[in-house]
Amino acid sequence: MRHFLSSCILILLVWSCKNEPEKQMLNIKEKGFIAHKAMVVSAREEASKIGSDIMQQGGNAFDAMMATEMALAVAYPYAGNLGGGGFLVYRLADGTKGALDYREKAPLASEKNMYLDENGDIIQNKSTVGGMAVGVPGTIAGIFEAQKRFGKLDVATILAPVIELAKNGYIITKNQEKRIAGYDSMFKAVNLKEIPYNNKLKAGDRMINNPLAATLQRIANHGRDEFYNGETAKKLVEFLQANGSIITLEDLAKYEAKWRDPIVFEYDDLTITSMSPPSSGGICLNQIMIMAQPFDLKDYGHNSLKYIQVLVEAEKRAYADRSYYLGDPDFVDIPVKTLTSEAYLNNRMEDFSFSEPTSVDSLSHGNIIGYESNETTHYSIVDQFGNAIAVTTTLNGGYGSKLYANELGFFLNNEMDDFSSKPGEPNYYGLIGAEANSIEPEKRMLSSMTPTIVEKDGEFYMSVGTPGGSTIITSVLQTILNVHEFEMNMQEAVNAPRFHNQWLPDEIRMEPNAFDKKLIQQLQNLGYNINETRSPIIGIVDGILQLEDGTYEGGADKRGDDTAVGF
Ligand code: DON
């Protein structure tokens, strides 16, 4: 009998695996990891686990932020970093909301035309690889500022497991092997020697980083100033200058993370809190959602023709505004109130029609080539005290400028490319900018990062964000709508196929083989250009959703190695 039962179970298991597509057709929900009290969802299991353990030791979301962010710097050097920057959006248990900007800054010696040659043309690669591409890093200032204001544990306790991770190593995944091999020749070209990340690393290998363990130990001993004024600062500046950077000790000493008022707006019964400038994320998300709100998205259906048309046209208008108006608020006046007002946005959609696309030239001009990847990283955390955070952090490109400080154990960003090097010329993400995002000493470059917290009826509902350069905003948008309009759970919402429009280039990017051919034909018949080849995936979204019974569901995007851990 026992034999018979186990055979039946085996047959059922085989059957259910074989019938995966049917399962989807029957619409059986893919549910994410459930936790009762606290959770971290991030790009690496090791980082989620270290963050979760810190909360289990009595730490809160801000302690877990420091631990998770540093663990990502160890185990996900593609985007996790000490040499980059990021943004935090938080909601405390009492409902207070806020944002922290630890975006990189242009060095003091920067000049508006530093990436142009004598003819005024862009010098290829100068803003994307090597020392000249590096902005003054903000990550250490950011995690210390957040932890100092809201954390509960001491820094040495928080960093101890991260240092252990660096010393004991982590296992290289298949995805990492592929990425590292892909960048191998660039690493060699930029660093002029072999670095520990090279094409000899294979999936299953253990990667130990003793120099990074030592850097983190010094930071644990001496605090934030170790990175900005101490021995690490000296070593870093020496290394950077030897590699053509204009960053000085004064640049590091002057760096401060800044508390900002986040962008807060209502959509139906949701209150959405997202990142303010110098990120464009919050304003663009606000604009797109308010432009889309009068339409009956739910009735149109998920990823239906009309749904795609409304979102694409709203996105087009928001990205056109982005490129003209947005930049570092410490340097430029941004008409935030007008840009996000209902009157302005309704007016903006006045020429929208279901019968044809609005021409991009009637919104503004430009001629660009851009492409996409997922080289930033996002994590979401909720703690057992009721606090929630959304954090997106980046080196910009994969492994940033590819410049690797061997002695310190980390990569440096290439965030300077997020400035508009020349008005009207596209950057790495195909985004074009204007005066508002031109280079000035100490200015922060415009970002698209969109760490976002959603409340429903005044209670915490969701924490969400993603990498993906210019596609970050539209991926966050679709994830929120997937849950709110189409009643998906968190895991389904992050897994669902995504599309993207950013005004220029004049095309809808779609994840390949994820959309119905007939639908694509219908869009083309209407006059839309469809590009299914540019982005193999759009975003790697991580999120946490509070369910009706008060538990949390993690959504760890199937597109990466992302994992939810909690208790
Ligand atoms: O801040 C930004 O918008 C970009 N530096 C983000 C880069 C990113 O998402 C990389 N992944 N594609």
Image (cartoon, helix red, strand yellow):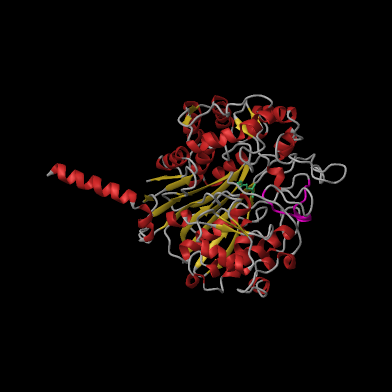
Q: Is residue 93 visible?
A: no
In the image, residue 403 above or below residue 117: above
- Placement of 338 over or under 383, stated as above or below: below
Q: Position of residue 68 (x, y in %)?
A: 50, 40
Q: Which residues are magenta?
A: 429-440
Left/right of residue 244 with respect to residue 229 in the rendered view: right
Could you tell me residue 444's position as x and y percent? 71, 48
Q: Principal SS element in the magenta part? A: loop
The image quadrant that residue 508 belongs to is bottom right
Q: Percent from the top left, x then y, of residue 154?
A: 50, 37
The quarter of the displayed image where residue 396 is located: top right
As for residue 438 lying within the magenta part, the answer is: yes
Along the viewing direction, whichever of 222 and 526 lies nearer the viewer: 526
What number of labels is visible? 0
Extreme residue toward the left, this view: 1
Query: Which of the two residues, 205 or 224, is positioned nearer the viewer here?
Result: 205
405 displayed left or right of 1: right
Q: Is residue 309 visible?
A: yes
Q: Nearer the viewer, residue 499 or 548?
A: 499
Residue in view at x 53 percent, y 65 percent: 519
Locate residue 216 relative to residue 384 in the image: left or right: right
Q: Is residue 276 magenta?
A: no
Residue 94 percent location from the top left of the image? 48, 57
> Which residue is depicted at the point 70% across and 28% down?
239
Viewport quadrant of the N terminus:
top left
